Image (cartoon, rainbow, N blue to C red):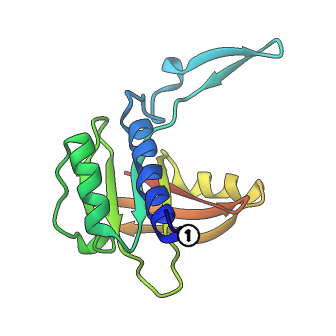
Amino acid sequence: MNSSQARLSILCLAPLLLVGAATSDQPTMDRVRSDAESKIHDGIRVEENALKVQYLEIVTPSVDETCHVLAEAHGVVFSEPIAELGNARTADLSDGGRIGVRAPMRATEEPVVRPYVLVQDIEAAVKTAEKAGATVAIPPMEIPGQGTFSIYILGGIEHGLWQL
């Protein structure tokens, strides 16, 4: 296997793993506090909300091939390109989220798999990320008919936030 084939294999396998994680039966972050899970950590009761991946974005130069592999492996149907989502082809996830596969939008955009976690208050979530040392790559931006998203970079990893 040459390096190009290895890279393509990695690009195909990573989304499959994340799709499995994203399609598991996950509660949403916007549950009311009384419905939060309680756990004991170091003797202190901690209230936790579960994470929900609202949008899983795959940026790849192999859009058709990636959509084909995901469709065959998971029995999903991808849409035609959606202009508002950077011409991503999308498929619905069983928990109400979506997966989108699109080509890079500029010559310098590298392939990436970026989960967008659902939040109730995107402005507050961005401020929390900044306080932790994150760099905001894209401040909260509304996509008409889709919601509001933001991207931040922390520890060399791109993270997405999504508010409906």
Question: Which residue: 41% across, 56% down?
Answer: 12
Q: In this orientation, does residue 99 appear? A: yes
Q: In this orientation, does residue 144 appear? A: no
Question: Which residue: 69% across, 52% down?
Answer: 128
Q: Is residue 34 left or right of residue 47?
A: left
Residue 106 at x, y percent in the picture? 45, 86
Image position of 49 with respect to 123: above or below: above
Q: Quadrant of residue 103?
A: bottom left
In front of the other: 78 or 43:
78
Q: Is residue 32 left or right of residue 152?
A: left
SS category of the residue bearing label 1:
strand
Image position of 37 with respect to 59: above or below: above
Mark 1 surroundings: few (<14), some (14-19) or many (≥20) residues within 10 A: some
Residue 118 at x, y percent in the picture? 46, 46
Q: Amino acid at mark 1?
A: Pro
Q: Quadrant of residue 136?
A: bottom right
In front of the other: 33 or 92:
92
Image position of 33 with respect to 22: above or below: above
Residue 35 at x, y percent in the picture? 48, 19
In front of the other: 45 or 25:
25
Residue at far front of view: 1
Question: Which residue: 35% across, 58% down?
Answer: 147
Residue hosting label 1 = 139
Residue 66 at x, y percent in the picture? 32, 60
Question: Which residue: 44% across, 57% down?
Answer: 9
